[in-house]
Image (cartoon, rainbow, N blue to C red):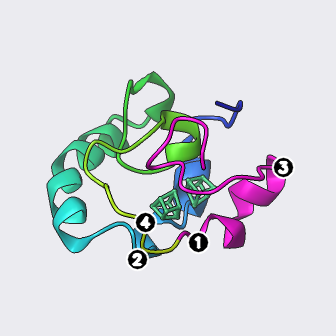
Amino acid sequence: MGNVEKSKENLSKCMCMKCPSYTFACKVKSMPGNMVHMMKGDVSEAEHMEGLFCAFGKSKCITDKKGCVCGECEVYIENNLSDQYYCLDQNGK
Ligand code: SF4
Ligand code: SF4
């Protein structure tokens, strides 16, 4: 796992919500938890979130490779990331 900062700013740049691998069912499932963390204001304290997977680690819901849009993400570029599918593997695939 790299050192991507768990921040609201990075979360807002994360493209995972627009990714085909992040299924509708997983989005619905993750919404309440993600909302709670966002409302608390400081996501750096969160142990896990269903998003910004390059910082928080793999998803508890996403299971299938259906494409990855990490390469189009600002966080990816800013942190010199080189892998994909951080939702499926702690260190990307
Ligand atoms: S890590 Fe990649 S594959 Fe997984 S949800 Fe984000 S953009 Fe999609
Ligand atoms: S690199 Fe991928 S997992 Fe990380 S913030 Fe961007 S879209 Fe999300």
CA–CA distance between discs 1 and 2? 8 Å
The answer to whether the beta carbon of the residue marked 1 is less than 8 Å from any atom of ligand 1 is yes
The mark that comes first in sequence, 3 or 2, is 2
Range of residues picked out in magenta: 68-93
Against 17, residue 14 (above or below) is: above
Classify residue 43 as left or right of residue 91: left
Q: Are marks 3 and 2 in contact (CB under 8 Å)?
A: no
Question: Which residue is denoted by mark 4 in the rendering?
Answer: 65
Label 1 environment density (alpha carbons within 10 Å; few <14, some 14–19, many ≥20): some
Q: Is residue 81 magenta?
A: yes
Mark 4 C-beta to ligand 1 under 8 Å: yes
Numbered disc 2: secondary structure: loop
Residue pointed to by mark 1? 69
Q: In this rendering, which labeled residue sits more in front, label 4 or label 3? A: 4
Q: Is mark 1 on a helix, strand or loop?
A: loop
Inter-mark Cα distance, 3 to 2: 23 Å
Give coordinates of residue 78: x percent, y percent. 82, 53
The secondary element bearing badge 4 is classed as: loop
Q: Are marks 3 and 1 in contact (CB under 8 Å)?
A: no
Q: How far apart are marks 3 and 1 (CA)?
A: 15 Å
Q: Mark 2 points at which residue?
A: 20
Alpha-carbon neighbours of circle 2 within 10 Å: few (<14), some, or many (≥20)? some
Q: Residue at x 39, y 69 (%)?
A: 21
Q: Name the residue under label 3.
A: 80
Would residue 49 appear left or right of 35 to someone viewing this image? right
Q: Which of marks 1 and 2 is nearer the N terminus?
A: 2
Q: State which quarter of the image contains the N terminus.
A: top right
